[in-house]
Image (cartoon, grey):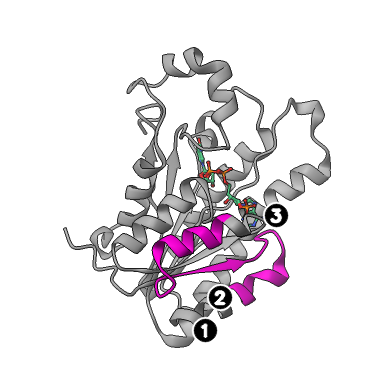
Amino acid sequence: MDLNLRNKVVLVTGGARGIGAVICKMFAAEGAKVGINYRQSREQAETLAGEIGCGQAAPIQGDIGNEADIAPMFDQLEQAFGPVEVLINNAAHCPSGPLESYTREEWERTFAVNVTGAFQASQQFIQRLRARRATGRIVNISSQAAFLGSTSGHLPYDASKGALISMTRALAREVAPEGIAVNAVAPGMVMTEMVAEIWEQRKEKYLARIPLHRIGQPEEIARVVVFLASGAASYMTGATVDVSGGVLMH
Ligand SMILES: NC(=O)c1ccc[n+]([C@@H]2O[C@H](COP(=O)([O-])OP(=O)(O)OC[C@H]3O[C@@H](n4cnc5c(N)ncnc54)[C@H](OP(=O)(O)O)[C@@H]3O)[C@@H](O)[C@H]2O)c1
């Protein structure tokens, strides 16, 4: 299937490592031009851009939780490759701990990155599409924890991922008449730095509740994200696609 992504300009937030890095590579393999946003992983972003090739990838520094960083990220990517046509809201902050351990500051930081950051990046993206009367696609990376909660203490993160799904639906309705699609992916456990330690500690418990009886790989999420960002998903908007090895089945 031709996904028709050749020369499309894609911004992936938190694209330097983990699932985001694989998403960047997969877009590049489809011929897209990728902005690899990072907050602190400069070296990884530069290495990844080098692997992809500088004519097709650019590292873009910016803290998604900081309003002042949002527009300059789009400006930089536009200067490198032209107007952005696809936005992947992948960056996430995921603190761990029991209920009593969270401060208001930690709660707000989690929402600032996972919800407000995705909102402001989407708002900026849509304003730019509208100015060009262009269509575009957004994919938000949520989590199965939005539906089920975590068993390992990630309350603010779980709540933020639920908000991201609500935002996906509300925004999808609002911008559908303009040909802008907004979808989400809800991954189950995927082997990245975010979960590597907890997976090793509680592997048997996790395996028991995953029908496919294994942890997911970043490629298995990235393939769905790239599909949703392409014209092949032309009749989809407001959807949340479960990629959880069968944990969700909604
Ligand atoms: N792994 C899983 O099991 C799993 C399950 C469900 C959903 N997800 C979701 O999948 C997405 C990717 O997760 P992952 O496992 O790949 O995570 P990860 O390995 O922990 O990577 C997190 C990424 O987010 C970026 N990031 C964090 N705060 C940022 C900020 N303020 N501004 C810009 N970038 C920021 C990091 O960039 P820097 O290093 O530059 O800070 C990094 O690239 C997240 O949305 C996560 O919630 C993951």
Q: Is residue 91 above or below residue 8?
A: above
On the rendered structure, is 98 left or right of 146?
A: right
Q: Which quadrant is home to the N terminus? A: bottom left
Would you name the residue on which mark 3 appears?
112
Q: Residues within 10 Å of mark 2 (few under 14, many from 20)?
A: many
Q: Residue 49's x, y, as percent?
A: 47, 64
Q: Name the residue carrying label 1.
A: 79
Q: Few, some or many C-alpha atoms within 10 Å of disc 3 (few <14, some 14-19, many ≥20)?
A: many
Instruction: Inspect the image, locate mark 2, and give the three-letter code of the amino acid beneath it.
Output: Phe
Residue at 64 percent across and 70 percent down: it is 70
Q: Residue 145, percent across and down?
A: 53, 34
Question: What residue is drawn where x is 32% and y is 49%?
Answer: 223
Name which residue lies at 37% across and 38% down. 243
Which tag, 3 or 2, sits closer to the chain's start? 2
Establish if 191 lies above or below 167: above
Q: In the rendered structure, which segment of residues is drawn in magenta?
A: 44-73
Q: Amino acid at mark 1?
A: Gln
- Is 233 left or right of 105, judged from the image as shown? left
Under circle 1, the secondary element is helix
Callout 3 amino acid: Ala
**Within the image, what quadrant is residue 65 found in?**
bottom right
Which residue is most to the bottom?
132
Q: Measure the C-alpha gap from mark 3 to mark 2.
A: 19 Å
Q: Is residue 226 left or right of residue 18?
A: left
